[in-house]
Amino acid sequence: MEEYNINNLAGIAREIRKKIIEMTYTANSGHPGGSLSITDVLTVLYFKEMNIDPLKPNDENRDILIMSKGHASPALYATLAIRGYFSESLLSGFRSMNSDFEGHVHRGINGVESSTGSLGQGLGVAVGFAIESKIDKKNNKVYAILGDGEMEEGNIWESLMAANKYHLNNLIAILDRNMIQLDGFTEDIMPLNDIGEKVRPFGWDIININGNDINEVIDAVEKAKKSKNNPTMIVAHTIKGKGVSYMENNPKYHGAPPKNQEEYERALREIGE
Amino acid sequence: MEKLEKLESLREAYGDELADLGEENKNIVVLDADLSTSTKTEIFGKKFPDRFFNMGISEQSMVSAAAGLSLSGKTVFASTFAVFLSNTYNVIRQSICYNKAPVNFVVTHSGISLGEDGPTHQILEDVGIMSGLPGMKVIVPVDSIETRRVIDYLSEKKNSPYYIRLTREKFPVLNDNNYEFKEGRAVTMRDGKDITIIAYGIMVSFALKAAEILKKKNIDARVINMSSIKPIDGNAIIKAARETGKIMTAEEHSIYNGLGSRVSEVVSENYPVPVKIFGMPDIFGKSGKGMLLFDYFHIGVNDMVNTAEKFYNEVF
């Protein structure tokens, strides 16, 4: 597998962020906020930590990633494109009729393991993949990217229990703790408080990090990979809209693209800096 | 003279067949949600504990995990009571159907024949719920033998998810051991020329009894077992419409969105004839002896006879 140095990873993350802006602006719809917050995590996973090969997307020993927060499709599609799963030019079709790039994460796209969008389902799907790895004695890892608002779904807590029961130390959930959901701030809509401390008693190892710091993400994932017994949840404290000043910590940009040429250019400029 | 009925449990047939198949087919994994002693997946679970996963009273995560296991190549059977599976509708919709994950849902305790557990558990809408999902196939085995054949058929991995609806109560054995199940093929259980009763589940047995009574009234009823509801056997329906002129559907299900609706679609598009939809009206069930509830709700054998006779004599 290719190795990238830390400078490259930061550069790749910038490229992914630019694509997120381009895709949502071109489509005039989509979810930039939660895509920008999870970009650094996806960069580390797809360009450093995951055992994958875009030329062998169905290799049975590949690592699996389930993007449970399916509205972060721009981030995943852009990451997969830059990683070489398909041509970057296809991204311009995002959310349009003559394209396979559906609004939410779509399994028809090369490299996508499961369709998501209706929240709360991806962790359970990842549990299924992780159980299969255990049955077939594989050494791969299964990653699930969760949104923090998504933690309000009951299925998540069911699946947390199942992962503990079956000792899925091959399962790594990464929680995008950006503090914002569609209607506003998570602590106003449904307080999650110290979410890691709620999950820990379910039998999970918890690692709190700055999820927009590439080095911290690398360290956390490498630690999680070594878990002997427990599944790990990395609580990635992130900034929603990270990299674009007017989007940062602004619930309005959960599901709204740059609204005019000026905002679009400003976003690209700020990401490039 | 009526011959003595042989009654057998469909869910036991399921559990036994699954455990038999698990011997040779190591790819089979089974999930349940704390009802394995009732759904009978425990027979498999005791034999193959490494391939059996009791997910607890957590149907949503059971369905999600079933999707993951299926997408990673396993042949997955997932069981609970019919009513509890339906509370995961949107998980089935997205993670199973939209993902094209070929999971086999085998549910038990459907319908009013469930009996004493009452209306909270007696689901009468599930055939409609599941039939509406893109790519989902829906089968209701008529007896223990057909149940075994269906499970056997599904043990070879398919390309789409299946919903197999079973019941708590033992039902009459109508098929013999040579019976072969074929998806999308109806079976004519009794030929007739005046009217056709198309049914599934226990209603096939009722229809055969009703046909005997109708015969004494000089009404020659054809009885069809439409165990494969989706895909449905359109040819058998069109043939019945053409040859008998009137079709009555009968199901242990709401009259809305069930077999009656499916048959009406085929008939109205291809060979319009009058259709009578026989089943539960738009109400919930109630507690009581399972097999007595049919008469209570006026969907027993005698009600079927009366409805069919009136329908036969009706001039349209």
Image: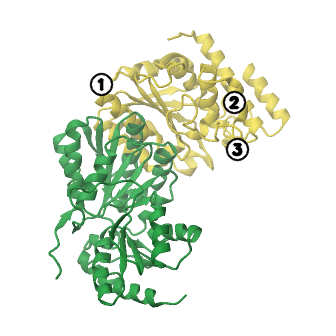
Under mark 2, the amino acid is Leu
From this view, report whether residue B166 is shown above or below residue A47: below
| Location of residue A87 by image quarter | top right
Res. B309 visible in picture = yes
Q: CA distance from mark 3 to mark 2?
A: 24 Å
- Please state the horizontal and vertical placement of residue B17, each as a whole percent of the image: 22, 49
Q: Which chain is green?
A: B
Label 3 vs 2, first from the N-terminus: 2
Q: Residues within 10 Å of mark 2 (few under 14, many from 20)?
A: many
What residue did someone put label 2 on? A91
- Say whether mark 2 and mark 3 are on the same chain: yes
Q: CA distance from mark 3 to mark 1?
A: 45 Å
Of residues A214 and A135, which is closer to you in this image? A135
Q: Residue at x 52, y 90 (%)?
A: B315
Residue A184 is left or right of residue B136, and the answer is: right
- Chain of the residue displaying label 3: A
Q: Which mark is residue B68?
A: none
Of residues A180 and A60, which is closer to you in this image? A60
- Please state the horizontal and vertical placement of residue B279, each as a whole percent of the image: 40, 77
Chain A, chosen colour in render:
yellow
Q: What secondary structure is marked by label 2?
A: helix
Q: Residue at x 18, y 48 (%)?
A: B43
- Chain of the residue displaying label 2: A
Of residues B165 and B90, which is closer to you in this image? B165
What residue did someone put label 1 on? A137
Q: Residue at x 60, y 15 (%)?
A: A9
| Location of residue A18 by image quarter | top right
Q: Quadrant of the N terminus of chain B?
A: bottom left
What residue did someone put label 3 on? A252
- Please state the horizontal and vertical placement of residue B276, each as a whole percent of the image: 47, 80
